[in-house]
Amino acid sequence: MKRNNLIFYLLLAFCCVWQTGCDKKNKSSNKETSKPTVTPPAFDMDSAYQFVKAQTDFGPRTLGSAAHDACRDYLVGRLSAFCDTAYAQPFTARTYDGKSWSAANIVGSFAPEKRERILLAAHWDSRPFADHDPNPANRDKAIDGANDGASGVGVLLEVARQLRQLNPNVGVDIVFFDAEDYGPKEGDNAPRGEWWGLGAQYWAKNPHVASYKARYGILLDMVGAPNARFLQESFSVRYAQNVVAKVWATAYDLGHGDYFANRPGGIITDDHYYVNTIAGIPMIDIIHYDSSTGTGFAPMWHTVSDNIGAIDKTTLGVVGTTLLQVIKNEQ
């Protein structure tokens, strides 16, 4: 995913001023001190962790690699075991460096006959270069992408496993987007174009069901770091403010207000942007925001340190439980 730099720093300055004012308010009004008011649905954070690890065990899932092919087959197999239908959606990804790659979005559906639907998504590829690694010697190495990619997929696989028992009132579609993270390196003189989120762009123009509609969508990206903080990403608020409100309120009711902070975050060109602007489905991005790093993301972002050691089971559980409760609440 790509941070929109100018707007990001303007928002960062705003957030700092906003937070200073909020810190002066009575702590009892701060949603981050929330206590559970509802019984959380079943979600096995250990199982979600194993789904993350299974992906990273293949190695970096970069376009054109054997690990990419093996992980694709694994993900199709897992969704086939949990969903009513599951399959790969192949496409050709043309990247900023003039190369073409065989890629595939992976789709799983529950109750495909139901008209009212919810879309859940994450990206499953990993970045082919660690261009933000503090060690210059590592910057051309591919990354495992445990947090940046695999964490969202792992949570959604466990959500899928639980949905089999939950039997919600709405249909649910899970899409794992490919070719999200093969964007230009920092400082590259790349040609103008939309080089991030290639799988999401393809799916938005060619959904797995003709004229596909959903009430809304939720994208997960980087949802596995310890003590993660999920602020309200700006494109999410612009296109799907009511969905942001629904998800953050649900997290608060579950006692997760310390993770889902009721504050504005940066503006991120992620897969949800294309689902909103091309497919016209209101979609939000649950994404870890960290204003202390200089990038806006967790310290391991686009480094070789983004491996299974960076994953915290509790964070996976917080996000997965919130998602399941959101779906459970749908009528």
Image (cartoon, grey):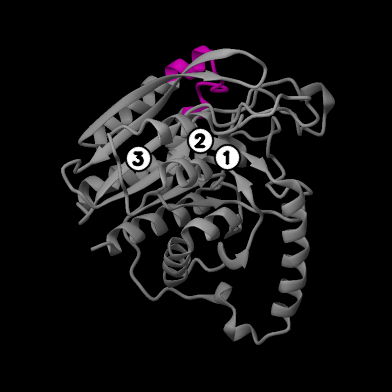
Q: Position of residue 232 (x, y in %)?
A: 57, 60
Q: Which mark is residue 150?
A: 2
Label 1 – label 3 distance at C-alpha: 19 Å
Looking at the rendering, in which quadrant would you find the N terminus?
top right
- Which numbered disc, 1 or 3, marks the residue that appears first in the sequence? 1
Q: Position of residue 194 (x, y in %)?
A: 60, 32
| Labels 1, 3: front one | 3
Q: Residue at x 62, y 47 (%)?
A: 268
Q: Is residue 312 visible?
A: yes
Instruction: Name the kind of residue labelled 1 in the image.
Output: Asn
Q: Is residue 117 left or right of residue 319?
A: left
Image position of 106 with respect to 226: above or below? above
Q: Are marks 3 and 2 in contact (CB under 8 Å)?
A: no
Q: Which stretch appears magenta?
A: 55-70
Label 3 – label 2 distance at C-alpha: 14 Å
Q: Are marks 1 and 2 in contact (CB under 8 Å)?
A: yes
Q: Position of residue 310 (x, y in %)?
A: 62, 41
Q: Secondary structure at mark 1?
A: helix
Q: Are marks 1 and 3 in contact (CB under 8 Å)?
A: no
Q: Residue at x 50, y 48 (%)?
A: 313
Looking at the rendering, in which quadrant would you find the C terminus?
bottom left
Foreground: 284 or 262?
Answer: 284
- Which numbered disc, 3 or 2, marks the residue that appears first in the sequence? 2
Residue wearing tag 3: 174
Instruction: Name the kind of residue labelled 2 in the image.
Output: Ala
Residue wearing tag 1: 147
